[in-house]
Amino acid sequence: MPALDIQSVTKSYNKLRVLDRVSAQIDKGELVTLLGPSGCGKTTLLRSIAGLADIDEGRIVLEGRDVTKVPIHKRGIAMVFQSHALFPHMSVADNVAFGLKMQGVGKAEREDRVKRALSLVRLDAYLTRMPHELSGGQQQRVAIARAIVTNPTALLLDEPFGALDRKLRETLQVELRRLTKELGITAIFVTHDQEEAVVLSDRVAVMNAGVIQQIAPAVDVYENPANEFVANFMGFQNIFDAKVRSAQELAIGDTVIATDKIDVAPGEGIRMAIRAERVSITAGHREGAIPGQVSSSTYLGEQNAYVVDTADGPVTARIPTSVARFSMGEAVSVSFDPAAVRVLAS
Amino acid sequence: MNRLFFGVVIALLFTFILAPTVVIALSSFGTSEILEFPPQSFTLRWYAYALARPEFTSAAWNSLWLAVSSTAIATPLAIAASLAITRGRLPGREVLQTILLAPLVVPSVVIGLAILLASSRLGFSSGSTRLIAAHVLIVLPYLVRTTSASLVRLDPLAEEAARTLGANSLRTFLHVTLPGLAPGLLAGMIFGFIISFDNVSISLFLANARTNTLPLSLMSYVEYNLDPSVAAVSTLLILMALVVAIALERFAGLRKTLGA
């Protein structure tokens, strides 16, 4: 039995469908991120699970219990928001104790559990502080402690680190992952940051236009995007039209390139994708490579990013500066690592 | 030079604001039968005299009762109105806000006369009910203003967080929303109380012999008498306002409450 079963959830605002028959199963103790651009429906899905938004159709089942019609406060979930949403008039300890108080947990046990939760986020020395006396990172850690202390059936996080600087964000990502794994908490994390999704999650659900485009382990989403949207969103800089020539050959324009095995019938037109890191550039012309001219070059430190104009469109490549350098306008040819070419489902 | 100039301006300003109060307070202690300043010798007998006059004491009780009840009625209304204005998706909430704040800009003489005419036309002339209703009307804008100001600064996500943590809407309101808007609410209640207690222009139209308020009885008293008992009552009123302001500063922080 999955910890969270989302069954064909549909939701519209003013005739605009923000969730379109979304289904997903999340296992106990799993950390899943909902990843997508703003307006893709990820936050609405999270709020629907929490009960903060009503859904038009479908069911939400939490640990075997259908909670679709259950009010927010009886769902046994906990949520962490981007603005920490701490109670400003309560001390850190009272903030964390709030959920336990609502559950009717006795004072002695409450104090004990509050201390334990705060030590899990390494803030045990801050019990009596007020929220406004803490830094942004500390506030968000208190918010996490406040959420996990209640042993929620699901921990829902809505871009909780979005307002923090990069370094702090990375620290908290690692901490959150450690914490949920230690406690075996089922967590759903909303973000628009691919890197954050890849670092954090067991599985990533990429969303667009109210639909989950792909839900798979982070490695799969990163390396084998299911379709063009996912490829684009996960940072595949090169996406082309191509024609299948054989089980191991694609034609891009007049150039035939080698690939790993392709499961599409020869003669079919497809879309293919490849990351800039897996494109190589050689000076002059070469068989099995696409000829073109270097039209831009950007220094990135370890690498140079080049754009090569070809008859089939611009190709972006990232070449380690230690390997080779090319100058603007130079006649070159680009070739693809056969193992890295991805055929996208249409 | 510049500093000296501003120092003088500030001193003059304070004199201008405080001098009448000082004059009233000092003359209330004068022994003479008519108000004089500065008093030649000092006594407390006008305080005893004023406190023994039933027209003042019963009017004071009326005013107190009126101010307390109109503030008490306006408070829940103001909370509901502020929630609707700042949180709701109510259509026309800007219009609602304007209407609620209107008594601040409409001259209160007009309001008093309007309520008198309207209530007589409707055959609704119970003195005290009408008076309380009118005072609720003039107290409400102050409460709505300060309460909304507090509410705007309260993160609505804090309320959602409380809901997800197992609080139903009543407990969320009691534990999160209400403490969040308490400073503004408290300030508004105190303003409202003082506005109602001091009001002359509306009470003038609506009060009768039984519901005479303190400001009204002071006014009619000075028409025929000019002894320092009026000053004594005024000094007591000033003292009351001062105590309230100090208490507010102590418990809630006056500056914080006023949103400065």
Image (spheres, rainbow, N blue to C red):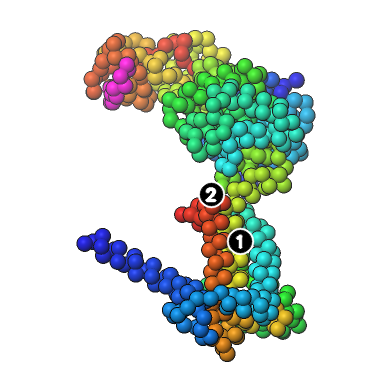
Residue at 67% across, 47% down? B173
Asked if residue A272 is positioned above or below residue A190 in the image, the reply reads above
Q: Residue at x 24, y 23 (%)?
A: A328
Residue drawn at (59%, 26%) of the image = A118
Range covered by the magenta-colored residues: A294-303
Percent position (x, y) of residue A323? 30, 10
Question: Dividing the picture into quarters, in which one does residue A113 lie?
Answer: top right
| Residue A201 figure quarter | top right
**Residue B152, position in %: x, y?**
54, 51
Q: Which mark is residue B153?
A: 2
Report which residue position mark 1 lands on: B189
> Dot 2: within a 10 Å radius of its alpha carbon, few (fewer than 14), some, or many (20 or more) residues?
few
- Identify which residue, A97 or A326, lies in the foreground: A97
Query: Which residue extends farthest right?
Result: A65
State which chain disc 1 sits on: B
Which residue is more in the foreground, B141 or B100? B141
Foreground residue, A220 or A231? A220
